[in-house]
Amino acid sequence: MKKLSYLLSFIVFLIVLSACNVEDPEGKTDEAEAKSNQQAGGDLIIGTTGSPTLFNPFYSTDTTSMTIEGFIFSGLITVDREFNLEGDLAEDWEHSEDGKTWTFYLREDVKWHDGEDFTADDVVFTYQIPIDENYNGPRGYTYEKIKAVKKIDDYTVEFTLTQPNAPFLTISMQAGILPEHILGDLPIEELGENKFNTKEPIGTGPYVFEEWADGEYIKLHAFDEYHLGKPNIDTLTYKIVPDANALMAQLQSGDINFTGVNEQNVEVATELDEKGIITLQSGPSNSWEYVIWNLRNPLFEEKKVRQALSHAIDRESILEAVLQGEGEVAYGPGSPANWAFNPDVPRYEYDPAKAEALLHEAGWEKSDNGVLEKDGTPFSFTIKTSQSDTREDIAVVLQQQLESIGIQTDVEVMEWSAFVEDTGPPNWNFDAQVSGMSIGSDPDPSYFWHSKEIENGLNYSAYSNPDVDKLLDENTRVLDQEKRAEIIKQADAMVAEDQPVSFLYYPNSHLAHSPNLEGPVVNAANTYYKLHEWKFTE
């Protein structure tokens, strides 16, 4: 057995947390002491424009839900700000020479939020969920290489894989562990709809779920028995506000004290930072923004049509007009922030004449009213997006750019949770959507482009290419990072050629917080790293 006593480096996307604590002075009245406690621990108020949908790591698909899950649940391992793996619920782990057997040694001092002991039974139960034949959630692909999970003793678990799997540690082992003593008797097919996911989630993470006021806030409080130490900050409020402008206003007034800043508000945030009202941090993100074409719609079935659509989009003007230059024009998947990024993919740059020529080759001709038609069917569809100043503006610009070549579109803006439910599995109710995608702990692109992900996964476009599938399958079997990077680059180049989506830009990441909040550091790996150590200073 090869001991993993060293830290492994990988690109990672995890969720963000916060905390704070100051020792109470002695000799105060009850009222003064209560006030001092409130000031000492404080309430970390995180501002967002998106509402969650549920809190279960095996059924959620939106970033808001996954962020809050990161406060409530813990995984066997986590990552630091540099993508190095660290033990969380697991103290150590080792693997066999063939890479098919992994043994995890669990901490023995972990409690669930209801006071029960965390044991190997919880790990076995959790990982049997996504490999069960009755599992109907969106994470099946992530765990399909797991053949068996076995309890060796109360604090030792053994995983058997069907083959070596490169993302096994970096993705599969970071899933939030669920409580067997609460959910163990539920049929797997009913787990996704259980009240546990919305009313009473119980985890081992730094914060305990308290209340969800739909459309307003989610309230949590510090877990006194958190295995890494009681969080410094007493309570955490995940506050939902109408839009990005409201976020900035509430950040300035002190009604929230931590939030992400979209590209359109960076200039305002910079001014507030210079005045000492807030602290602004900026850096690269591990994500991309794009337009997803739903290949389930006959309008987008032909590759030549999708290439034409990409030629019709002026990314440079979008980046400058909507984003004030904050980001980098994108032509393919991945991110410049990760080690498998391919900058040399086929590029479909802005060229309206080329777009019109390709559409003509595909049989589309302009009618008397200037709208393209084929066999009596107009080229007309709806662009959906979520409530976001940036994405709403992008959708409007896209509408104008497509109209200039004879394509008629409507723009529909939806509240975030409704958008996620409507456009995601199993509904897939959209023609096109302006959206974004964050890359996970490992740059495996299978989640976005493998045909296995079409029914219930993250392959929103329903893209299918057998040659790409073959490369994606190969990529997870190769443990050598350099060889694996070349395979991923080949697959990404094929995806860029086929254009199941039109890539727009790679965004920068901007975090703003109260100057007296100590702990946050902008990074592409783990925004809420060591949240329990965050604190407010005087």
Image: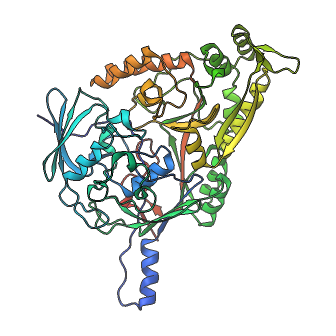
Residue located 65% across and 49% down the image: 265
The answer to whether 316 appears left or right of 443 in the picture is right
Residue located 32% across and 66% down the image: 230
The answer to whether 132 appears left or right of 513 in the picture is left
Q: Position of residue 293 (x, y in %)?
A: 61, 27
The answer to whether 14 appears left or right of 321 in the picture is left
Residue 248 visible, this orientation: yes
Comparing 23 with 424, the one in front is 424
Colour mapping used in the image: rainbow
Q: Is the residue 40 above or below the residue 223 in the image? A: below
| The N terminus lies in quadrant | top left
- In the displayed image of the protein, which residue is found farthest to the right? 368
The answer to whether 95 appears left or right of 448 in the picture is left
Q: Is the residue 475 above or below the residue 268 in the image? A: above
When asked about the image quadrant of residue 275, the answer is bottom right
Residue 57 visible, this orientation: no
- In the displayed image of the protein, which residue is found farthest to the top? 361
When asked about the image quadrant of residue 95, the answer is top left
In this figure, what is the number of numbered marks?
A: 0
Comparing 233 with 375, the one in front is 375
Q: Is the residue 159 above or below the residue 517 in the image? A: above
Q: Position of residue 425 (x, y in %)?
A: 51, 38
Q: Position of residue 457 (x, y in %)?
A: 45, 34
Q: Position of residue 335 (x, y in %)?
A: 48, 31
